[in-house]
Amino acid sequence: MNTLKECFDTILRNNEKNSRLAARSVSKFVYGSAASSKDKYEDIANLVRIAPENYSRISEDWRQENYVMAVSVIYFLHDRENQPDFLFPWLFQLLQHPNGHIRYAAVKMIRHEIGPLTYHLRFPGEASSFHEITPGDADIILRSLLASLNGLLTALWQPKYKRHKYVDSLPAGPYKSAQMVLAELKESCGKKYIDRLADYFNG
């Protein structure tokens, strides 16, 4: 494996042992200097863009885990800063996966987008030099994200969760993973903004 693309090919097509080793080698290719920056980042952007399509063709549970874990390593270098929710439908699918490693990778990737989406709330009136999304577009995505999370949590709710006061104390599973994302969203948005969103949905 001499390139990042070869590494992902191995994850997708080789046996379980080699697939696992390739998944754990992805960070070496991301942070190493073997490839030129331009080529490397173009490869990463392409690999992230086609991730849902590649994932849909995987049937083995172990290969799904290897693939999602590898994508989560390169995800932050995608080239869609003007459309940070472009993989949210896929990531919400992963939040419901029975495999905890896959769910946590999904949480990690969604959390990565919460920072840019809430920049205008955390630093009002201050222009960002590295986020390409407008405050208005960010608000639209935040409303959609909150609605989707609340819908997912409603669908996943079980009476046993009522006795858990804190997210950390919840039993491992999709409900806890979705609550982890919601907690990050609420903290980054702030109570006043979340209350305004609640009024927006209830109005």
Image (spheres, rainbow, N blue to C red):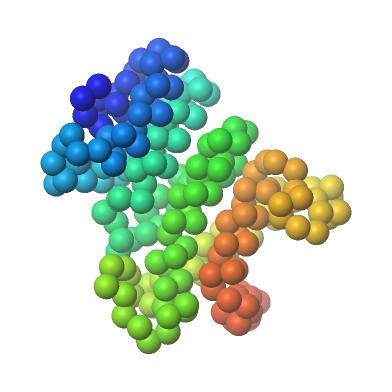
The N terminus: image quadrant: top left
**Residue beneath the point at 45% across and 50% down:** 109
Residue 144 locus on image (x, y percent): 50, 65
The answer to whether 36 is drawn above or below residue 81 in the figure is above
Of the pair 74 and 87, the residue shown nearer to us: 74
Name the quadrant containing residue 30: top left
**Image height of 123 relative to 79, above or below:** below
Q: Is residue 125 left or right of residue 132?
A: right
Residue 172 percent location from the top left of the image: 70, 41
Relative to 170, residue 71 above or below: above
**Image quarter of residue 27:** top left
* Residue 141 at least partly seen: no
- Residue at the (75%, 43%) spot, across then down: 171
Query: How far across and down, in percent of the image, does residue 168 sit?
Result: 71, 52
Left or right: 74 as drawn, with respect to 151:
left
The total number of labels drawn is 0
Residue at position x 81%, y 54% from top? Answer: 164
Which of the image's four quarters has the C terminus?
Answer: bottom right
Q: Is residue 164 visible?
A: yes
Q: Position of residue 37 (x, y in %)?
A: 16, 45
Residue at the outermost bottom position: 125
Of residues 121 and 200, the one nearer the viewer is 121
Residue at position x 49%, y 56% from top?
Answer: 111
Relative to 202, say whether 44 is above or below: above
